[in-house]
Structure formats: C-alpha cells, structure tokens
Amino acid sequence: MVRFKNHFIQEVVTMKQAVWKTGLIVCVFALSLIFACAKPPTQEIANAEKAIADAKAKEADLYVQDVFTKAQDEMKKAGEMVAAKKYDEAKTAAMEAAKIAQQAASLVDQNKQKMKEEIDAMLPDVQKALDETKTLAATAIKKKVAASKEELQSAIGKLELDMTGIKEQLQAGKIRQAGDLAKSLSEQISAQKQNLTDAIGQPKTAKK
C-alpha cells in the first residue's frame, strides 16, 4: 500500500514537472514569435520621409524653419529607434514626424505672405536711407573728405544694385532671399551713412 502511494506521488510530481516544462516551452515559443514578428515600421518611415520632402518642396525649411526642424528631429529619432530595434518607439516618432511636416507645409503660404508684407513696409525706409546716403556721399566728394571718390561711388553703386535685387526677388516670389538681403542692405546703408556723417563733420586739417 505504501509502495503504491509513493509511486502515485512520484507520478504526480513527474506530471507537474512535465506540465511546467511544457508551459515554459510554450512561453519561450510565444516570445520567439513576438520578436520574430517585430519589424521596422518601414511604411511609417516612408510616409514621414515623403511628408518632409513635400514640405521642403513647398519651402517650409525657409518659411516655417522651427516647425520643419522639429519634423526633421523626429525623423532622426525614428532612425535611431530603428537602429536600437525599438520599433514601437520608431513608429511613433515616424508618425509624429509626418504629422509635423504636414503642419509645416500648411503654414508656408501664410508665413510667406506675412514676410512679404513686412518687407514691403520696410523698403520705403530703406530707400529713404539710401537716398540720404547718396546725398551725403555727394557732399563728401564735393568737400573732398572722402578717402577715395571711386571707392565711395562704387560702394553707393553696390547699394543701389542690392536695392534693385530686393525688388526683383520679391517679384520672383523669393521672399526669404529678399528679406535677408533687405536686412543686410539696411545694415550696410546705416554703417555707410554714419561713416559719411562722421567724415563730413570732421574739421579739415590745416595744411602747413
């Protein structure tokens, strides 16, 4: 009777061990399937790349720089997550990149128009400053206080060419380029104007 009981207990233990091993094998197999099925989010990444390319084609990198840069950052993050085989995070980042890129593209026209309006409002002041600088240049040449008449005339000529260039770029729809040139021109005129004012205001050195 005792022998039968011990045998029975041994069989129960053996069955439990078999069930435990089977369960372990099933778990390992299931995990293997999960990892085997995990793949890079190629479609989401392709969508994000296209959205970013489309946004850049609309010049979002020029007129919505902060938003466009954010989309690029998310795209970079997606690539890093793929390299680390963190595919869920990569998918999320890629989808976010596409969303932000589309947002950037939608903001281009209004930002471009706003920038054009700002340049249009700025140009009359730039033109006025340029005219005043030309007058000062003529006075400096007349009073012979300019270091070099030819160099001064060349400098004024370049300022006039830049002013023409701004207007041409505006007409061509190159608003960002026109804006950058307008700011640069304004700074150049201001510096030239100050130099001429100082030169004209200085008393002539008496000749011995």
Image (spheres, helix red, strand yellow):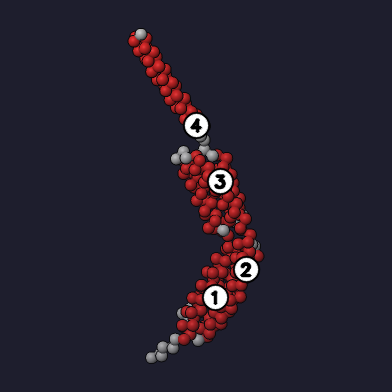
Crowding at dot 3, Cα within 10 Å, few <14 / some 14-19 / many 20+, comes out as many
Q: Nearer the viewer, mark 2 or mark 1?
A: 2
Q: Name which residue lies at 46% across and 44% down.
A: 80
Crowding at dot 2, Cα within 10 Å, few <14 / some 14-19 / many 20+, comes out as few
- What residue did someone put label 2 on? 117
Question: Reading the chain from its start, which is encountered first: label 1 or label 4?
Answer: 4
Q: Nearer the viewer, mark 4 or mark 2?
A: 4
Crowding at dot 4, Cα within 10 Å, few <14 / some 14-19 / many 20+, comes out as few
Q: Is residue 14 visible?
A: no
**In whole angstroms, how far apart are the C-alphas of marks 1 and 4?**
72 Å
Q: Amino acid at mark 2?
A: Glu
Q: Amino acid at mark 3?
A: Met
- What residue did someone put label 4 on? 34
Question: Reading the chain from its start, which is encountered first: label 2 or label 3?
Answer: 3
- What residue did someone put label 3 on? 95
Q: Is residue 105 visible?
A: yes
Tags 4 and 3 in contact by the CB under 8 Å rule?
no
**In whole angstroms, how far apart are the C-alphas of marks 4 and 2?**
56 Å
On residue 47, the disc is none
Q: Nearer the viewer, mark 1 or mark 3?
A: 3
- What residue did someone put label 1 on? 156
The quarter of the picture where the N terminus appears is top left
